[in-house]
Image (cartoon, rainbow, N blue to C red):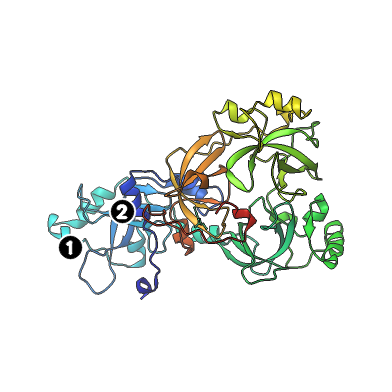
Amino acid sequence: NTKQNMIRSFDWGSYILGSHAEGSPVACFKHVPVSDCWENISIGMKVEVQNLDCDLTNTVYWIATVMKLAGYKALLRYEGFGSDGQKDFWINLCHKDVHPVGWCATSGKPLVPPKTIQHKYADWKDYLVKRLTGSRTLPIHFYSKVQEGISNHRFVKSTHVEVVNRMCVSSMRVATVEEVIGGRLRLKYDDAKEEGDEFWCHMRSALLHPVGWSLQVGHKLHAPQEYRSQCLSKTTMQKYDVMDATPDMFPQMKNPPEGYKFQVGMKLEAIDPLNLSAICVASVMKVLKNNYLMIGIDGSIAQNGSDWFCYHATSPCIFPVGFCEVNGLILTPPRETKGSFKWFDYLKQTRSVAAPVKLFDKEIPKHGFKPGMKLEAVDLMEPRLICVATVAKVVGRLLRIHFDGWESEYDQWVDCESPDLYPIGWCELMGYPVEGPRLKTEVPFAAPQVQSHAKKR
Ligand code: MLZ
């Protein structure tokens, strides 16, 4: 019995109904299965599902209407209940037991009306024909599109990658894919000394790169000499090993505007990689090849650049001087700033220049996220966790993600195209646990953390 084996997990359905909130539509998340055909999914659409309101011993089906949508999840009402919601139930539309109308007829399955309303109509066939005329249903092969969306990538167990060192974000380490769940990779660092020296990130994460990337762009890398020498022939002669992640498996980076370049010392505003709830005063510390930059947060306590962080020149997480002010956001000034922070004075004091506005990518994709929408989001400070979250703010393409039940210090600024955001029901679809909201009565457990990435916890 699968029901008994299922771990008790967070119930999105009652949470959505109780909070009167909306879930971000699946179409907002370009990196998830069936995102591209979600425009065909809407309230009022009809599907065929198992009829659980019946005493028969064999499995029978009935038609149901989508009353509400929250990410992948739909609140369904069996046909014939009219305005009566007593038997409404939530279901994940990507589940294999949800079928388009017509499926029972073509596969010889019985359609039987629910027993609660059996008496309501004498001629159910006639009733159904009338109700179904002109109605919409799931796109054909919907379930196989879901499956295809889950598995159409080349990251498999044992793939070698280069990924940010979670203990020291200014360097990269070599890692091997241990597990792939919905495009999310569980990575084991190749030089791991202890059990559990792992990292989770999505295959489209900006923290992840192909074999040879670090040496190619000039990024600091912790790897044995043998690996380094192999990299050269790999990247120059394209002589990769079969299990190496290669550049063609990664998203193409944009080109920065022609003719201008970031220069060491230029000032800007950037999301603090070690405290994603803050946008800070920052500087270009190093210019790498292929338009990558090492950015440092001004006034940080870390020594010898251990907290410098690599951002691509077109990254949506770096902003021109004045961005926070223009958008009414709090800019975190360098530590030990006395009085209020003024960019004009600070630039003069530090004899530096602001990175010209024309260097920054200004494209704002049509994303559809709105404040108040619920979703599932990776806690990037503990990336194994996917949590119940709310869009707290939308600033152009930038989103402030709030984790339900947690203080705003835990909030995270992320780009609208971040692969670490998922629609409601994504975890359920992938069979991965979703962390429910922290309950107000729970005493937060502050276990000592070894992660420099999770400083404040
Ligand atoms: N170690 C942390 C986990 C916080 C997880 C929050 N996710 C939104 C703590 O217990 O404080």
Residue 267 is situated, as x and y percent measured from the top left of the image, at: 73, 33
Q: Position of residue 389 (x, y in %)?
A: 46, 48
At x 68%, y 69%, the residue is 158
**Residue 302 falls left or right of residue 3:** right
155 is higher (above) or lower (below) than 74: below
- Tell whether 271 sits left or right of 6: right
- Nearest to the observer: residue 219 or residue 275: 275
Is disc 1 placed on a helix, strand or loop?
A: helix
Q: Which quadrant of the view contains residue 248?
A: bottom right
Tell which tag, 1 or 2, sits nearer the viewer. Answer: 2
From the image, tell me which residue sits under label 1.
Answer: 115
Residue 86: image location, x then y, percent: 21, 54
Task: Kindly identify the amino acid type of the residue bearing the numbered disc 2.
Answer: Leu
Which numbered disc covers residue 76?
2
11 or 164, which is in the foreground?
164
Q: Residues within 10 Å of mark 2 (few under 14, many from 20)?
A: many
Which residue is depicted at the point 58% across and 59% down?
Answer: 183
**What's the residue at 52%, 58% (across, down)?**
385
Tell me the SS state at disc 2: strand
Label 1 and label 2: CA atoms lie apart by 17 Å
**Disc marking residue 334:** none
State if disc 2 and disc 1 touch (CB < 8 Å). Answer: no
- Drawn side of residue 303 relative to residue 138, left or right: right
